[in-house]
Image (tube, rainbow, N blue to C red):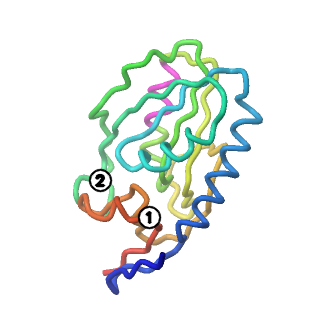
Amino acid sequence: MNTKYPDKLQVLYPRQEIEVAVARLAEEITREYQGHNPLLLGVLKGSFVFMSDLVRRLDFPLETGFVQLSSYGRGKESSGKIKISHDLKTPVLGKNVLVVEDIVDTGNSLAFLADYLRQKKPASLQICCLLDKPSRREAPVPVHYRGFTVPDKFLVGYGMDYAEQYRNLPDICILSE
């Protein structure tokens, strides 16, 4: 199926490439977490599509939870002020926690979340992201599993949005002005 998008959207990763990356990540995670009953912690809203596809490929006991951070509002630039707008409901004490994120950009949100989670004393804490944009990194964030390293462009689709639009696109697209 070939989807026609408006001119302001350019496909960076079509759904077939995303499926291959998710399968590869699931294999890597399975090798490390098999038998460890990890807690996969999705960062809402952007990670929900990626996390859904990822957990369906993991064939071992695991738990899931979600947390929502806020720093973007409705624009393209982060406000720099991070807050937890939906806290996790699952305890992390003594658990192997794998944070699942759609994209790591400046790293500020994930650094904030990692510090927050470390205070809850997990047995281990690692990060899995579909997209990593190291060219914009401001805070050091150790990414243990990454699908793609991406250019410094604003990306939408496959769960990622601009002003709550485009989350439903099956491809990852560059949004131009």
Check if residue 73 falls in the magenta segment.
no
Taking the spot 43% from the left edge, 36% from the top edge, the residue there is 112
Q: Tag count in the figure?
A: 2
Label 1: which residue? 170
On the image, the x and y values in percent for residue 67 come to 38, 33
The residue carrying pointer 1 sits among few (fewer than 14), some (14 to 19) or many (20 or more) residues within 10 Å by Cα, namely: some
On the image, the x and y values in percent for residue 111 come to 49, 39
Q: Return the disc, 1 or 2, that comes first in the chain's sequence.
A: 2
Q: Nearer the viewer, residue 106 or 69?
A: 69
Quarter occupied by residue 87: top left
Taking the spot 38% from the left edge, 25% from the top edge, the residue there is 88
Cα separation between marks 1 and 2? 22 Å
Please identify the dominant SS of the magenta region: helix
Check if residue 114 falls in the magenta segment.
yes
Quarter occupied by residue 26: top right
The answer to whether 87 is drawn above or below residue 134 in the figure is: above
Local SS, label 2: loop
Q: Amino acid at mark 1?
A: Pro
Q: Amino acid at mark 2?
A: Tyr
Taking the spot 50% from the left edge, 18% from the top edge, the residue there is 92
On the image, the x and y values in percent for residue 12 come to 52, 74
Local SS, label 1: loop
The answer to whether 145 is drawn above or below residue 153 in the figure is: above
Q: Nearer the viewer, residue 126 or 12?
A: 12
Q: Is residue 71 left or right of residue 98?
A: left
* Nearest-to-viewer mark from 1 and 2: 1
The residue at the far right in this view is 31
Q: Nearer the viewer, residue 127 or 168?
A: 168
Q: Is residue 130 left or right of residue 156?
A: right
The dot on residue 72 is 2
